[in-house]
């Protein structure tokens, strides 16, 4: 059975040693300069998000549980956690958890308004583009586990390049490790990578195409390292921009 790239307890996160995408993805040096951040909830969940304005973070809607409280976690040079306050959260009103758990398309996007702005450079949203073709490359960054079921393998920002498979559309995108094609374990999203940015290269650098929603093991079995399911932002960009304004933020130039 497929599963979302969901959360695990904060205790496991904070005990993580020097080891986030499964399959041996390389670590990104000095993650504190990157737009990707870790999110933790009062219910014990853990996800990845992306700074899209100095005080605004984009993540997956299934990372936000109604009634829970959230904080950003930054690791200092000594690997001790620093917790940053979140003032408001909003998830897309059309998001349906049951639909997402069945790996059908839904509005799996959410925003978190920070109590204080960050010094990190925000990541831009990708401009409108033609439909994705099978084999196109995408760059993914995430803080999740590198080994399924081992929470102490999380907490380091890692990068992988994956390719589109199947019949890509603006409702859902499925990515695989180009070296394995999803037929055996390879690079892919896993626990804690939910909400991670899915980038494409532009002339001015990386821009966000979508967010990670779910994962499978090889050959669509349970686990990680097979398919990585992505919610494209094309249909939800209007909501993101309007909600950002309601929260007192501005997205993009």
Image (spheres, helix red, strand yellow):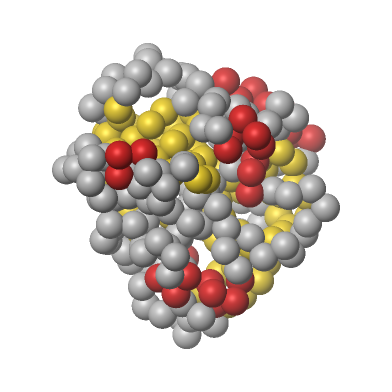
Q: Residue at x 52, y 45 (%)?
A: 4
As drawn, 143 above or below 132: below
Observer-nearest residue: 74 or 136?
Answer: 136
Q: Residue at x 30, y 39 (%)?
A: 219
- The location of residue 33, given as percent across then percent down, is 44, 61
- The location of residue 170, given as percent across then percent down, is 47, 19
As drawn, 238 above or below 33: above
Res 71 visible: no
Q: Is residue 180 left or right of residue 81?
A: left
Q: Is residue 67 left or right of residue 181?
A: right
Q: Quadrant of residue 52?
A: top right
Marks counted in the figure total 0
Q: Look at the image and tell me in which quarter the C terminus lies.
A: top right
Observer-nearest residue: 130 or 40?
Answer: 40
Res 1 visible: yes
Observer-nearest residue: 245 or 151?
Answer: 151
Q: Looking at this rendering, what residue extends furthest in the top direction?
A: 130
Q: Quadrant of residue 162?
A: top left
């Amino acid at each position: 059975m497929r599963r979302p790239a969901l959360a695990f307890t904060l205790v496991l996160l904070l005990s993580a040693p020097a080891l986030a995408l499964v399959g041996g993805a390389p670590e990104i040096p000095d993650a504190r300069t990157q737009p990707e951040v870790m999110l933790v909830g009062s219910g014990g969940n853990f996800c990845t998000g992306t700074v899209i304005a100095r005080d605004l973070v984009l993540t997956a809607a299934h990372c936000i549980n109604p009634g829970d409280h959230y904080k950003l976690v930054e690791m200092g040079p000594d690997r001790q956690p620093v917790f940053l306050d979140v003032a408001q959260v909003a998830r897309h009103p059309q998001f349906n958890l049951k639909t997402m758990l069945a790996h059908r398309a839904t509005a799996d996007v959410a925003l978190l308004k920070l109590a204080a702005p960050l010094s990190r450079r925000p990541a831009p949203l990708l401009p409108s583009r033609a439909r994705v073709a099978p084999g196109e490359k995408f760059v993914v960054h995430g803080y999740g586990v590198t080994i399924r079921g081992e929470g102490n393998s999380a907490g380091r920002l890692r990068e992988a390049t994956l390719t589109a498979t199947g019949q890509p559309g603006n409702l859902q995108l499925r990515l695989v490790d180009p070296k394995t094609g999803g037929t055996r374990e390879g690079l892919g999203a896993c626990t804690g990578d939910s909400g991670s940015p899915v980038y494409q290269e532009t002339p001015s650098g990386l821009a966000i195409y979508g967010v990670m929603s779910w994962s499978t093991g090889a050959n669509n079995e349970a686990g990680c390292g097979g398919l990585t399911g992505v919610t494209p932002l094309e249909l939800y960009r209007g909501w993101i921009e309007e909600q950002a304004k309601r929260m007192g933020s501005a997205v993009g130039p």
